[in-house]
Image: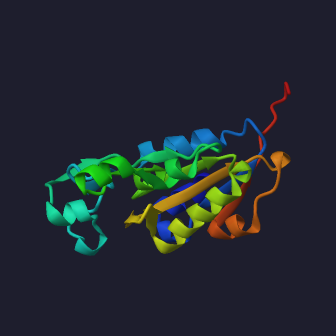
Amino acid sequence: MKRALLLNTINPKIGGVLIRGKKGTAKSTAVRSLAALLPEIEVISGCQYRCKPGTPQAVCDTCNSKMGAPERRQVRVVDLPVGATEDRLVGSIDIETAIKSGTKAFEPGLIAAAHRGILYIDEVNLLNDHLVDVLLDAAAMGRNYVEREGISISHSADFILIGTMNPEEGDLRPQLIDRFGLAVEVSGELTGDE
């Protein structure tokens, strides 16, 4: 498990990790502690998407219009709750503000928060099928597209996808299994007293 997590942080193009194991095998603890091991990343100051300085093709509209000074931030591990809504995952557009002011008022979702970091799904096998489809689209394209009421916004979506699951609680859709570059099984080691 540790090796699979570290390999993905070294080379995110591996495609993420699926960790399968029974309850109590420290799957979630290992994933959440991963961020502390990673070096800080350089981001454009004030950017809600954590855009990378010096890469004009990979920055958001806000950064293109006013490039802030670079700063260093810790890599994030963003949790995607099993009960999350689509708006919480991809973000939402404030239609009222957009109509009143004529500007795109976008509230970024969890995909934006995970950009240049880790998107973690505990009990990934219990995630809503529609959210799985939306997540797979964003991960495959490297961009998150949000379209509501004739307003369209997109931003980069470059993240390491890590999922954990207890096989006793159900299987994972084949489309999602294929999205993970590595899959590992973990098992608890019993002590003499157990």
x and y percent of residue 191 in the render?
80, 31
Where in the figure is residue 184, as x and y percent of width and height?
70, 58
Residue depicted at x 60% and y 43%: 81
Asked if residue 48 can be seen in this view, the reply is no
Relative to 102, is 74 above or below?
A: above
Side of 9 relative to 189 (left or right): left
- Seen from the viewer's position, the closer of residues 45 and 153 is 153
- Residue located at (16% from left, 64% from top): 65
Judge whether 141 appears above or below 100 on screen. below
The residue nearer to you, when weighing 159 against 186, is: 159
When the figure is inspected, residue 27 is found, relative to residue 158, above or below; the finding is above
The answer to which image quadrant residue 53 occupies is bottom left
Q: Say if 42 sits above or below 27 in the image.
A: below
Q: Position of residue 138 (x, y in %)?
A: 51, 66
Mark yes or no: residue 115 visible: yes
**Where is residue 194 shown, x and y percent of the image?**
86, 27
Query: What residue appears at the point 68 percent right and 51 percent down from the top-left corner?
Result: 127
Q: How many marks?
A: 0
Q: What colouring does the structure picture have?
A: rainbow
Residue 65 horizontal side relative to residue 60, left or right: left
Q: Is residue 170 left or right of residue 49?
A: right
Of all residues shown, which one is farthest toward the top? 193
Which residue occupies 45% across, 64% down? 147
